Image (tube, grey):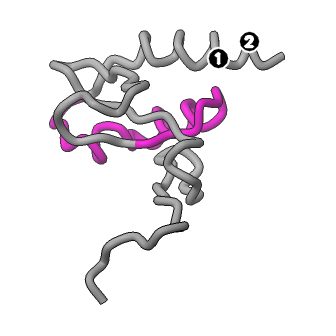
């Protein structure tokens, strides 16, 4: 098998917070720019990406476990303030 996705297949990724697999379209892609985690809504920013559910619970778990530093291969802690604002705004809009 060549490893290519087939016609109706939906690509899956793992949330670095809760570690559950979900459709790529249900997750928020995060990239590292400098020492900051930046949400990549369109999925076009260059570099390595990590995926997280757009929920505060998953974001808190990822930060507590230092999952972003590991997934994005960063040597030090990353600033997640902008990411937290983005996720909180999304949660408020869903209510």
Numbered label attached to residue 58? none
Task: Work out which quarter of the rendered image holds the N terminus and state it.
Answer: bottom left
The residue under the point 53% across, 10% down is: 85
In the displayed structure image, the side of residue 73 where residue 1 appears, left or right: right
**In the rendered image, the vertical position of residue 57 relative to residue 71, given as above or below:** above
Helix, strand or loop at mark 2: helix
In the foreground, 59 or 43: 43
Give the extent of the magenta segment. 51-76
The residue nearer to you, when weighing 82 against 65, is 82
- Residue hosting label 1: 90
Q: Residue furthest right?
A: 95
Residue that badge 2 annotates: 93
Residue in view at x 74 percent, y 11 percent: 92
Question: Does the magenta-highlighted stretch encompass residue 21?
Answer: no
Question: Do the residues bearing badges 1 and 2 touch, measured as CB atoms within 8 Å?
Answer: yes
Total marks in image: 2
Q: Position of residue 66 (x, y in %)?
A: 38, 39
Dot 2: few (<14), some (14–19), or many (≥20) neighbours within 10 Å?
few
Determine the image quadrant of residue 3.
Answer: bottom left
Residue drawn at point x = 46 percent, y = 47 percent: 16
Relative image position of residue 6 (x, y in whole percent): 44, 73
């Amino acid at each position: 098998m060549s490893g290519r996705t087939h016609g109706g297949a939906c690509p899956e990724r793992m949330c670095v917070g809760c570690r559950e697999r979900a459709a790529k379209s249900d997750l928020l892609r995060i990239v590292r720019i400098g020492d900051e985690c930046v949400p990549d809504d369109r999925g076009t920013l260059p570099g390595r990406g990590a995926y997280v559910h757009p929920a505060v619970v998953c974001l808190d778990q990822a930060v507590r476990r230092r999952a972003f530093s590991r997934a994005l291969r960063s040597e030090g802690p990353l600033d997640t303030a902008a990411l937290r604002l983005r996720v909180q705004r999304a949660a408020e809009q869903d209510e």
